[in-house]
Image (spheres, helix red, strand yellow):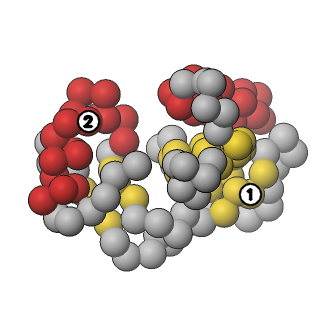
Amino acid sequence: MQPEVRTVPVEYTICGHSLRHKPAKRYAQEVLALLDRVWRVIKANAIPNDGINRVVQEGEEGEGYTVVAGMVLGLTQRPPGLAWVGTPSASVATPYHFLPATGAAMTKAFEVRGLRTA
């Protein structure tokens, strides 16, 4: 599967949680911990959602960055236990759930397009 690279603004707002990345921790551990918090609230309250986990990195690697994890909900008001964490403003590569198996292919596809990965 070829990655889809979007360079137009994203048109959704993620509802979930965010944290400041700790260099001593693995990125995947932090993402899974955030998504676990989000899914516990969604399941406990039967909140309608699009079922797509979204993870966004805000900021630069060297300066420290924020990891945002959540999904689009079928609600107009924020449910208790979750935060509106905003609309991603950066380019988005999807589907991210294929990254473990296709990370090298995605990196190459980005480089061919002149995009920098971080």
Distance Cα–Cα, label 2 vs label 1: 29 Å
Q: Quadrant of the N terminus?
A: top left
Q: On the image, numbered disc 2 is attached to which residue?
A: 103
Q: Is residue 8 left or right of residue 57?
A: left
Q: On the image, numbered disc 1 is attached to which residue?
A: 84
Choose between 93 and 108: the one closer to the eye.
108
Report the amino acid beneath label 2: Gly
Pick whichever of labels 2 and 1 is earlier in the sequence: 1
Q: Position of residue 99 (x, y in %)?
A: 31, 35
Res. 46 visible in picture: no
Q: Position of residue 4 (x, y in %)?
A: 24, 57
Seen at 52% across and 69% down, the residue is: 89
Report the amino acid beneath label 1: Trp
Q: Secondary structure at mark 2?
A: helix
Q: Secondary structure at mark 1?
A: strand
Seen at 52% across and 48% down, the residue is: 61
**Seen from this angle, which residue lies furthest front?**
62
Choose between 31 and 43: the one closer to the eye.
31
Using the image, determine if residue 6 lies above or below residue 62: below
Q: Is residue 70 left or right of residue 1?
A: right
Choose between 24 and 89: the one closer to the eye.
24
Q: Is residue 83 left or right of residue 109?
A: right
Res. 92 visible in picture: yes
Q: Position of residue 32 (x, y in %)?
A: 58, 27
